[in-house]
Image: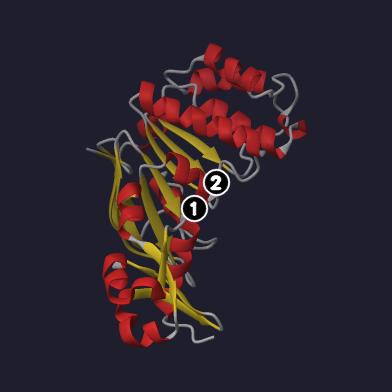
Amino acid sequence: MDAVTVKGLDKNMGRFRLKDVNLNIRKGYITGLIGENGSGKSTLIHHMLALKKQDGGRISILDKDLEMEREELLNRIGLVFAEDRFPQNISPKRLNGLLTIYYNNWHADTFFAYLERFNVDAISKVKFLSTGEKVKLSIAIALSHEAELLILDEPTSNLDPTFRMELLDILQTLMIDEDVTILFSTHITTDLEKVADYIVMIDDGEVLFDMDKDVLFESYRKVKGDRQIVDDAGELLIGTTINALGFEAMTKEPQALDELYGRKVLIENLTIDEMMYFIKKGKRGVDNG
């Protein structure tokens, strides 16, 4: 079962366009959304929340049509954005009173427990909180109303490394103890390497892949070797870069390259950042340096 289904989503924004986006966010898993700045990650999320109106396509969330059931769905979704979206002249304590009214399943005790755990002052006005504290406040809210779907848009970009690790631990605990689905958009891909079950890459408004993370790492490898190999087996390489020492690329056929060239090639595991790099280069063709 899918928590989010996007079918044929299209949005023309002038110089940028979401192009026939089809995407399934599996229920009960963490899906990482990756892509460069301007690739369409936040635009896609804004459409999932009906903050933007699409030109075509359909979005359903938790088996409900987004356009028809938006108010109910927002009660069931926990949101964390990198940017500050709070009233500036209100304290978290006063904000609690408003949230009690807004969310059907609001738990004030959980909220204040998270504020204490995250070391966020409940009395200070929001405008006096640091950028990181505001993100922590947003996380505390998202975790305090029994959200079935958490949508995190660059939540760790303004957090110190210690708290980033704590947040990842919290997310992993939620997946064990709760029936929760998480969509985690971030440019800090090492976070996704730790916690994500699936990885979706979007580039220039198009979904380039949507794969099980373990399958992704099993399927692709980084390969280095002599420049001559590019001429002989270039069809097995993705995003090839040629330099004075030889070449570097990604491949889906590491065994074939090993059998053909043996010690002439070095095959290594990839990081998510390296995958993004080679896939982007593959769209532009071979760089002859």
> Mark 1 or 2, which is nearer the eye?
2
Residue 79 rendering spot, x and y as whole percentages: 49, 36
Dot 2 lies on which element? loop
Residue 278 rendering spot, x and y as whole percentages: 44, 69
* First along the sequence among labels 1 and 2: 1
Q: Quadrant of residue 1?
A: top left
Task: Identify the residue shown where x is 59% and y is 15%.
Answer: 113
Q: State the residue lying farthest toward the right.
A: 128
Q: Do the residues bearing badges 1 and 2 touch, measured as CB atoms within 8 Å?
A: yes
Dot 1 lies on which element? helix
Distance in Å between CA atoms under marks 1 and 2 = 9 Å
Q: Which mark is residue 211?
A: none
Q: Is residue 142 above or below residue 47?
A: above
Is residue 152 or residue 159 the one in the foreground?
159
Which residue was labeled with disc 1? 42
Task: Identify the residue shown where x is 34% and y is 82%.
Answer: 234
